[in-house]
Every structure is written in C-alpha cells, then in structure tokens.
Image (cartoon, helix red, strand yellow):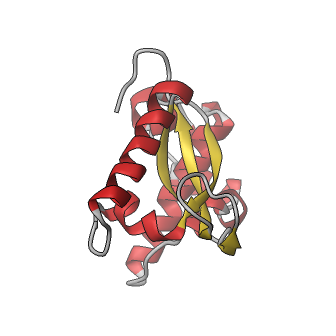
Amino acid sequence: MTFDELNDDQKVELKQRILTERNEQRGEGTSYGELADADDLVSDEDARDWAEGMEFSEDDFTCSCHGRTVKVEKIPDWAVCYLVNSDDSGLTPEDKKMVDDYVERLLKKEHLRLIGPIDGTESEFEPHPAFGLACGTVDFAAEELRDGESD
C-alpha cells in the first residue's frame, strides 16, 4: 500500500513515527500528548513526502493488529510507575495485588490492555478511583483486544 491507500488509523500511526523520529534527531523525547496530537502536528503533505516511494503492509502497523484505543479513567497516581515501568518501589504486597487484580479484571472481563497515561488528565483528588482509596488519579489509554488475543 502507498500512503494514500492507508486508513486513517494507519496514517496517524505513521505520523507518530515521523514525529518520534524528528524529536530523536533533535535529541528530544516524545510525550504521550504529542503522540495523541500527531495527526495535528504532522500534516498529510509532510507524511506523504516522508513516505514517498515506500510500500506498506498491514503488518507495518500495530493499529492493524489490535482493537481501537479507549480511555480508562481514574487510575490511582501511586500505581502509575508500577503499571508503566514495573517499578513496585514503595508499594506494599497488598497494593501490588490490587493493581494486578484490576489489570487482570480489565483483561478478562472488558478485554482491555492498558497502554499508558494520558497527558493532562491528572486529578489531585478523586473520591472514587478505579481501585483503592481516594487519591490523586490519571486517566490511561487502553486498547481493546480482539477475540483470541491475550496479554
């Protein structure tokens, strides 16, 4: 497929790659917010120029392999390092079990896999987080898994 034959999700994923490459060339990282806004930050014309002469297949895009991305709300901020980096420092065994049980429940009952936090969705105090007691929270992006997919 050429750039013009890509679907909207594939074009956004390609723009995320382009944005990440540009930032790496400047010695900078890419934030979740930038990735979420990649469709606005990289024009179709720039992406078409970047991809000129390239042929793509469905396997080149993770969005072709997985379901759509959805938002999971109110994840306790104390669990973010554990969810993103598997860093359990400062967590009790009970805390870890609570997070692991939540992730397993999302996977088995809702067929969702957490991807990562969504920039700008932090709340300093949430009386009813997804699990645990009242605390600061952040929303997470999650992907819907297709039938037969597992963690």
Which quadrant of the figure has residue 84?
A: bottom left
Which quadrant of the figure has residue 143?
A: top right
Q: In the image, 84: left or right of 117?
A: left
Q: In the image, 6: left or right of 145?
A: right
Q: In front: 84, or 69? A: 84
Q: In front: 46, or 101? A: 101
Say whether residue 80 is visible. Answer: yes
Q: Residue at x 34, y 33 (%)?
A: 151
Q: Find residue 104 and report its horizontal and vertical position in percent.
A: 41, 36
Q: In the image, 84: left or right of 89?
A: right
Is 27 located above or below residue 76 in the figure? below
Q: Residue at x 62, y 67 (%)?
A: 134
Say whether residue 55 is visible. Answer: no
Q: In front: 36, or 106? A: 106
Is 1 located above or below residue 85 in the figure? above
Q: Residue at x 53, y 66 (%)?
A: 19
Is 108 located above or below residue 99 in the figure? above
Q: Find residue 51 and report its horizontal and vertical position in percent.
A: 51, 49
User: Looking at this rendering, what residue extends furthest in the top direction?
Assistant: 148
Q: How many marks?
A: 0
Q: Find residue 8 and report its horizontal and vertical position in percent.
A: 68, 38
Q: In front: 90, or 142? A: 90
